[in-house]
Amino acid sequence: MAKKASKRVYVFDTTLRDGEQSPGASMNLTEKLEVARALESLGVDIIEAGFPITSPDDFDAVRAISREVRRPVVAGLARCVAKDIDRAAEALRDARKSRIHVFLGTSPIHRKHQLRKSKRQVLQMSIESVERAKAATHDVQFSPMDATRTEPDFLIQVVEAVIDAGATTVNIPDTVGWAMPDEFGRLIGRLFENVPNISKAVIAVHCHDDLGLAVANTLAAIKAGARQAECTINGIGERAGNAAMEEIVMAMKTRPDDFQDCWTNIRTGHLYAASRLVSRVTGLAVARNKAVVGENAFAHESGIHADGYLKERTTFEIMDPKAVGVARSKLVLGKHSGRHQFRRRLKELGFRLSPEQIDRLFFGPFKELADRKKEIFDEDIEAIVESEIVAVPETWRLCGIQVATGTGGMPTATVELHEEGKAEPVRDAATGDGPVDAIFRVMERITGVGLRLKDYQIRAVTSGKEAQGEVRLEAIYGKQTVSGRGVSTDVLEASAKAYLSAINRALNRAGRTKRAGRPKAAAKRKKAKSGKAKRSSR
Ligand code: KIV
Ligand code: ZN
């Protein structure tokens, strides 16, 4: 049996080639360069930058990336066709380290239906193409496409022949996601046992995810001796995608015991940022529950899990979020959260409440809200506490509102507000894109508080003709999110109340942070509450 390679596993990223083949994922040159730079910082060994023959854009991208990145090898894809190989060589000319990656279908299905070639012809084309590529660059990779559906003996013959022809890497692709992990591991093992010159090349694998096994197959191949993993960020790629880099790398890093200490050069702390970048430029969202980089990958909601996590992180976390570049784990509050979690979050938000108050809030408004809303954010908690226990001081109070609107006209709102401590109310008017916009604009003008609306929702809270409308909104104030709620039988008045409550909340927060930090804020709020009581009894 041939000697297996060292423990170093090379990472070959094909986000810019196979990844870009994901339906709907095309990237422009600027975006490709941005991704290439991110891959370089990540420590990727080989960047497959494109398939130069396919379009002038692909050619330009491979050439630009070749000129831009310095440390990784830049690879360009080519069919076993002379003009493809020559075009790839031209695109890679300025690369510090270049690789031509030639591929050819070897399975009976591909030979018969796609190529209409015999085994002998396929073997001959493979050898000639590797030799042609070798004349342009010493680093040549060959892929027998659909290797997992190729007769193993023929595959062994092809691998041996292309290594003899000069291939420095031979990639075994599971092109259609057909393989099972144990079977794929055995296939790689069989190559190591039967290809006499195998130690002269690096054996790579390239797995597709049609049955959700791309990462499992890649890992099985590594255990069997493969030393180059082909993958993409977020697992994007043809059809169901490729093996996800972040999952392969973190599996090896988290379980060195199971991988005989095999390692990659990936700076895992950059994985999350790379994932966000690729998602942004391709427009392909990352599923919340995606392993390693999904929104929920380090989020705990259930009471038991959160409780365990709070006692000792490793009870429910096998990776430290910082290891992949996520600042910290997230304790999500929702309907599965326990009282302990709720109490802890209140404390973090600066509220010092008695056990009775916490129980009242937890079993009352918190549970009610959790039934209606999947995730409860800090702003929701603040709104609950502020409406139930410590009212937000009403720096500004709504005295009156009048709105003129109609088809063709310019919606105009006149609003009268009273500022706490001032003798006279202030009245002003503004126009807007619609009546609600006009109301918000005039309120901003009077109070001098500018908010950026993030979310606005309106719903009926009672039924029938006299139904009350409830407006809930979220807005950005500086770097914070503030929420507002208003109820009225008139939805425009409800909108005005909601916006004004967000303004008051923003002013209160600004005051709170300017004062002495969160713990003292609760005391201030209590004081504010008694101030409010006094005002309303006037
Ligand atoms: O899936 C595949 O077989 C490929 C080859 C070009 C390696 O993408
Ligand atoms: Zn592929």
Image: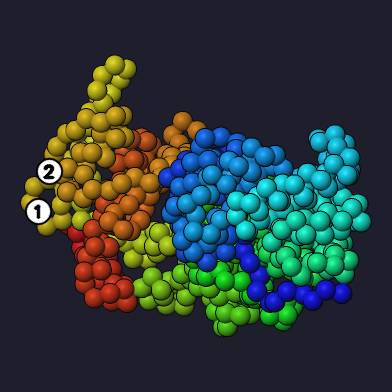
Element type where label 1 sits in the image: loop
Residue at (33, 58) in percent of width and height: 480
Residue at (75, 47) in percent of width and height: 128
x and y percentages locating residue 148 in the rendered image: 84, 53
Residue type at mark 1 is: Lys
Q: Which of 213 and 154 is in front in this view?
A: 154
Say whether mark 1 is within 8 Å of ligand 2.
Answer: no
The dot on residue 426 is 2
Rendered view: 172 above or below 331? above
Say which quadrant the C terminus sits in. bottom left
Element type where label 2 sits in the image: strand
Say which quadrant the N terminus sits in. bottom right
Q: Nearer the viewer, residue 120 or 256?
A: 120
- Does residue 283 appear in this view? no
Rendered view: 191 above or below 433? below
The dot on residue 422 is 1
Query: Separation of disc 2 and disc 1 at Cα?
Result: 10 Å
x and y percentages locating residue 433 in the rendered image: 29, 29
Within 10 Å of the Cα at label 2, are there few (<14), some (14-19), or many (20+) other Cα atoms? some
Q: On the rendered structure, is 125 left or right of 27?
A: right
Q: Nearer the viewer, residue 42 or 160?
A: 160
The dot on residue 305 is none
